[in-house]
Image (cartoon, rainbow, N blue to C red):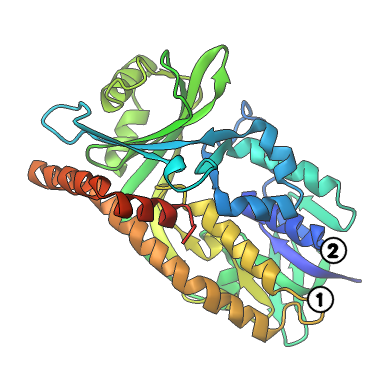
Amino acid sequence: MRQAVDVLVSGGGVAGLAAAAAFGSAGYRVICTDPAPPVTDGAAPGADLRTTAFLQPSIPVLDAAGLWQRLEPHAMPLQVMRIVDAGGAEPVARITHDFDAADVSAQPFGWNLPNWLLRREFVARLADLPNVDFRPGIATSRLFTRETEALVTLSDGTRVSARLVVAADGRHSPVRRALGIGVQTTRYGQKALAFAVTHPEPHGNVSTEIHRSGGPFTLVPLPDHQGRPCSAVVWMETGPEVERLRALPRTAFEAEMNIRSCGLFGWLEQASPLTVWPIITQIAERFDGQRTALMAEAAHVVPPIGAQGLNMSLADLAALIDLAKPETLGEAAPLAAYHRRRWPEVRLRLAGVDALNRASMIAPRPLRDLRAATLHALYSLAPVRRGLMQLGIGMR
């Protein structure tokens, strides 16, 4: 027997859960599958300890999906983004510039939350929607599309007929491969260490990127942990350097971490296990296929710079919801319109993040000096500074 739904979301990460909530809140019948049940406890093995900053344009998407009401009480506002250049002879801050949201808006740049908490709240929202069926531990095994429907076989043998399949199944997307859609991938030889730290100095809701070489060392504000100020860290470095760092005993790792952080928040203490993520840039050749839309990392992957990744995914979702009409859901015309709307913008943002990442990796001292001078010049021009901030948060 075949089960008929409007939308099948393949992938139960943050983006996939958001898509299921959004389509469900819009009244569509939805099944959401994911082979790995979401980890919704920050202390549990396999918890995603990275954080996500939802920038201003993402909030209406979350609100319409019934998600922001759940997230807002836990969210940490990001009022200032601080860029620090520490590319001199010694690892000390030599240039510091604050990009303040007040220059372009009455609201913060965005709001920061841990990824494991997002999953907890998103799953709770899906449980409140009677027209959404979330199936953790179930994968999309087979996909066959035709003009009128997509026929999907799940890993438990269930057969589903869907008017639209939303592929939110990650950078190695099985749905994308089944459609024969290729990708363009750029590799940097980089990995990212993600973990939480406590520190004596309050972060003041400031997100701080420290640039030296290998990639940025980023501290993102979190709520206090055991009575102490707390931040999420993403430390990007070359692959071999990341492997060396994570093999160190804790005391030696903390010593290296505090050298790299330039002591900006006092002595940092590791407050969570380390997780490691490979860094790539990737874009699918198309974001649409027959009865199928690619979104999030199935469509595009960016290095974790400037809070672009998940906010681009929510921009995908906003476009899909805007173009979805009950009478034409999953048809070729709205899917082609989705590709035309999103692909050029994503390509442009990927190029920008790629350039920033390459600049952050620079090792030779003269080039690091040039990077610092360029940062200072851009910051000093107020119209340019405001324009960059508006572009970064998606106001342009």
Check the picture and name the quadrant holding the N terminus: bottom right
Q: Amino acid at mark 2?
A: Gly
Q: Residue at x 35, y 14 (%)?
A: 267
- Residue 32 is drawn in which quadrant? bottom right
Q: Along the polypeptide, which appears first: circle 1 or circle 2?
A: 2
Query: Label 2: how many residues lie within 10 Å, few (<14), some (14-19) or many (20+)?
Result: some
* In-image side of 106 versus 324 (left or right): left
The location of residue 341, given as percent across then percent down, is 54, 75
Left-right relation of 3 to 379: right
Nearer-the-camera pick, 31 or 174: 31
Residue at coordinates 32% horizontally, 24% vertically from top-left? 257
Q: Quadrant of residue 103?
A: top left
Q: Residue at x 51, y 59 (%)?
A: 171
Residue at horizontal 66%, vertical 54%? 60
Is residue 284 visible in the rendered image? The answer is no
Q: Is residue 17 above or below residue 77?
A: below
- The answer to whether 138 appears left or right of 3 in the picture is left
Looking at the rendered structure, the number of numbered marks drawn on it comes to: 2
Query: Is residue 182 or residue 99 the one in the foreground?
Result: 99
Image location (x, y in percent) of residue 276: 44, 39
Q: CA distance from mark 1 to mark 2?
A: 9 Å
Q: Residue 326 bears which disc, if any?
A: 1
